Amino acid sequence: MPLDAAKTETLVSVRGLSMHFPIYAGIFRRQVGVIKAVDDVSFDIGRGETLGVVGESGCGKSTTGRAVIRLYKPTAGSIFIDGKDISKTEGDALRRLRPSMQMIFQDPQACLNPRMTVGSIIAEPLDEHRRDMSRAERQEKVRALLDQVGMNPDFANRYPHEFSGGQRQRIGIARALALDPKFIVCDEPIAALDVSIQAQVVNLLEDLQDRLGLTYLFISHDLSMVRHIADRVAVMYLGKLVELASRDALYESPRHPYTKALLSAVPTVEKRSVERIILQGDVPSPANPPSGCVFRTRCPMAEARCAAEVPAFRKLADGRGVACHFAA
Amino acid sequence: MTDATASAPVAAAPAHRSLWADVWRQFRAHRGAMIGAGVFGFILLAVIFGPMLWTIDPGETNLRARNQPMSWAHPFGTDNVGRDMLAQVLAGGRVSLAVGITAMAVSMLIGAAIGVLAGYFRRLDGPLMRLTELFLALPILPLLLVAILLFRDTLRANFGPEAGVFLLIVLIIGITSWMQTARIVRGEVQTLKEREFVLAAQSIGTKEGRVITRHILPNVLSPIMVSATIGIAAAIITESTLSFLGLGFPPDFPTWGRLLFDGKDFMTRSPGRVIWPGLFISLTVLSVNFIGDGLRDAMDPRIRGR
């Protein structure tokens, strides 16, 4: 499948997105450097499609997700949602765009205000954006949303601490759906749940996608779950996009050495067909990334060229994108 | 939760469970808080309605009934010029409680506002916290003395002798006691600000003002509550100290602290003169602390119902 999701029209288009966080030090709090959490990342997501983003902890997955829906102000690059560049929008104009993009959070404990009832948590987006709805209409909508995520509408009067992790995640999903968004960033929505609940939540997300035509950016470090839900998969390493391909192509024949290593680490019950690739060393600091290719310090294929030259994110013959000098 | 079973069979949307009804239900379950509320309510009623029932003028002297012990005519005894102690304690309580509650309100308002602003807006953090430290470094008692000497006469001239001193004392206590609250609130706000539900509110597009009132303030209510109850107690005690030092209200105007001050010289002769006002100060402070304890528990839905 091609890089730019030709099968449908593009809903989200990210070009050269960079998110750098300044580091301050000393008594005068001078800026002494930057953390390149996300560095020059570009991708497209088609309408109704799910783009999975995988990578290890600290590689910039969540930062990408948050920057895409403008919870951060990106350092550089542009983000088009439905053809509109939102990367420089601020204040009220940005607030008016919020309903079309929502987020589902990782920690179901922390993402719900413990002092609000479930009903008022789900009604918060309506209170902010749908002042035209009457109180009764809003309550009715809350009940419908609870029903939609498979929960008893009478739970609206309860508090978050009365629910299990999976139920809380459903409440978070109901809140994200309240404004009928087109695009939802799922920031590791299943990482904090146990395995039996993970499947339920993922199935709910897929079900909602079918019914409501949602577009997902699905961030996860669980490779098998991403294989289950995503149409295309982006692999990140140290703030850079290293490979972006359709799910089947990526899982069957990864081209980037990092993707290969990552996939070889997925546990299986069958006898494994490929040798595990064990990477040496640690992820370098994003404040001081290696020259050239950021992966070269741990790459089994690295040569002198990798230190000198930053590999371009190239399109291969089958339409996938890879950032490696040797991929073909 | 006990009402879960009751609401389950209801077919239509059950009535929105009000936060304050829940708080009240939990508060009633806290025994210490209920006793505290009873005692505080009794003291409040006594100082408000007591003078209407016990109609002896607290300023009326009766030289033939000086230094009387407890009796039916004078349940708390009399002082060295024959004024009735019960009437004085009741009248003094009005002032002491009014000072305590208003000074606490002033200090909570300043403390919570500065704490929330410093914790939520990074740019304001430095300046506001330096200001807080500045106030913390001020020696309170000498400052109070200077301020009272400087402003007493102007305020008296403008608002009358009692109201002027009342304003002065309330403002001074309020302005010099908000710093602990501000620091505690700032710390709480800083941790809350990083929680995902605040991020969720931002992703919804909630305005910053409403993020603060809807998500931040309710979650810092417990430390504010605790500070508030301690604040009432501290304000009553500071007022007592001022009156005790002879710097608060005019000498013929009874407050609990002033009564203690006047009574200390007669402690051996008529101990009731220090025991009664002292007892009321202690009871008020204690009951308010218990109320605060109960309120803090009742405000937290996680503790509620346990």
Image (tube, helix red, strand yellow):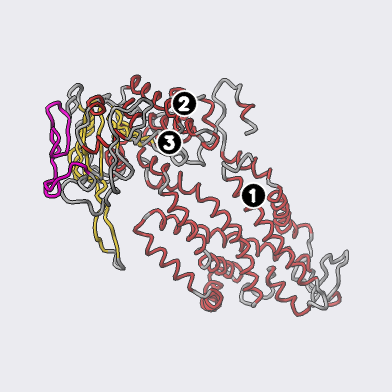
Q: Are marks 2 and 1 on the same chain?
A: no
Q: Position of residue A83 (x, y in %)?
A: 19, 31
Of the residues shown, which amino acid type is indicated by label 1? Gly
* Mark 2 surroundings within 10 Å by alpha-carbon count, few (fewer than 14), some (14 through 19), many (20 or more): many
Query: Pointer 1: what residue?
Result: B294
Q: Quadrant of residue B46?
A: bottom right
Q: Dot 2 lies on which element?
A: helix
Q: Nearer the viewer, residue A309 or B197?
A: A309
x and y, in percent, of residue A58 in the image: 32, 45
Find residue B163 and report its image quarter.
bottom right
Q: Residues within 10 Å of mark 3 (few under 14, many from 20)?
A: many
> Which quarter of the rendered picture does the N terminus of chain A lie within?
top left
Asked if residue B161 lies left or right of residue B255, the reply is left
Q: Is there any visible trace of residue A163 in the rendered image?
A: yes
Q: Amino acid at mark 2?
A: Leu
Q: CA distance from mark 2 to mark 3?
A: 14 Å
What's under tag 3, amino acid-wise? Glu
Gap between marks 3 and 1 measured at Cα: 29 Å
